[in-house]
Image (tube, rainbow, N blue to C red):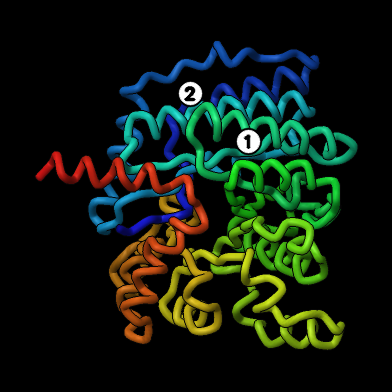
Amino acid sequence: MIIDCHGHFTTAPPALGQWRERQIKAFEDSGARVSPETLHISDDEIKTAIEQGQLKLQIERGTDLTVFSPGAGKMAHHYGDEQTSLVWSQVSNDLIARVCGLFPDRFAAVCQLPQSPGDALASSIRNSAAELERCVEELGFVGCLLNPDPSDGYWQAPPLTDRIYYPLYEKMVELDVPAMIHVAMSRNPAIQGTCAHYLNGDTAAFMQLCQSDLFTDFPTLRLILPHGGGAVPYHWGRYRGMMQDQGRPPLEESLLRNVFFDTCVYHKRGLELLTDIIPAENVLFASEMIGAVRSVDPETGRRFDDTKALLDSIDSISDADRHAIYGGNALKVFPRLASHVRNHHKQEEVAQ
């Protein structure tokens, strides 16, 4: 079974974005709140968005299940206040729950967290733990997105290893769910979003983990670095050397029991590097479809985000490693996916 661990609802019906604009404007103009009850999206609108977008590409590319979350860039944690972020997260997560309810054999839900920058960070992390519990226990979600920069481009928060985040990590361990470390939009004009801020975020988060003993405190905590880990595989020797210079344990010992990388790398040689440097058991198949890059690569004739075709073309990956990357590892990192896999197989049996 081929599990894509990184998908976003980037094709959400326009009403969602329009509601968000009203929410932001009302607060900025007068501090007013816009009720979630004023957002109206029908099941038919959701079905159309999915069937003409993500589901169509799933079928074309031969993937089975997508771990699905709200649009990462649209999390935009810097807008409004703590309550703004909480309500926006609840609205976004409830919509993802509806997608997964309509297509239970094709999508498994991951939630947005109601983080806030500045003085509100600590209380927003407590809110995040509560929202994660709601999504997992009540809505059947399998994980969450964790933004290492809720200031959205200005990096004003403590590192992810700071104790301010511990209430969230305690809840993640209790619920046995992982987090994908994923920045949101960049409002910094010097740092473009998808090709600078995203990759900078992956790289910065890995360095934070290298400099900490977070996994001593949380030995079962699992974190996923998207986009192939940013610069990490390319500079693996630098990280190994730094750890050695500082007298810290080797990367394999200190991080790779807990940190995983996805395959959102949009060219073959980059994926060859990733799968050569990072052990296969730490690599999860992903495409970020439909996401950062939507056009066709003139060199391959396929869309840039068709990472399955790229992986299929790499002969150096063994059959056992390919099986692990395409689905086996996801089931270990996301234990709550097992029920979705069983449901998918039942649907296949019915179809046959």
| Image quadrant assignment for residue 12 | top left
Q: Using residue 223 as the reference point, say whether residue 5 is left or right of it.
A: left
Point 82% across, 66% down: residue? 212
Find the distance from the CA under tag 2 to the CA under tag 1. Answer: 25 Å
Q: How many marks?
A: 2
Point 37% across, 64% down: residue? 326
Q: Secondary structure at mark 1?
A: helix
Q: Which residue is mark 2?
A: 15
Vertical comparison of 217 with 276: above or below: above
Vertical comparison of 312 with 344: above or below: below
Q: Nearer the viewer, residue 23 or 117?
A: 117
Point 59% across, 59% down: residue? 224
Does the image show residue 146? yes
| Image quadrant assignment for residue 62 | bottom left
Q: Secondary structure at mark 2?
A: helix
Q: Nearer the viewer, residue 177 or 116?
A: 177
Which numbered tag is attached to residue 94?
A: none
Residue 265 locus on image (x, y percent) = 48, 69
Q: Using residue 166 as the reference point, say whether residue 262 is left or right of it.
A: left
Please state, as top left, top right, bottom left or bottom right, where the N terminus lies in the image.
bottom left
Residue 63 locus on image (x, y percent) = 30, 56
Q: Which residue is mark 1?
A: 132
Please say if the residues under marks 2 and 1 sit with CB atoms less than 8 Å apart.
Answer: no
Vertical comparison of 65 with 278: above or below: above
The amino acid pointed to by label 1 is: Leu
Residue 346 locus on image (x, y percent) = 22, 42
Residue 17 locus on image (x, y percent) = 54, 29
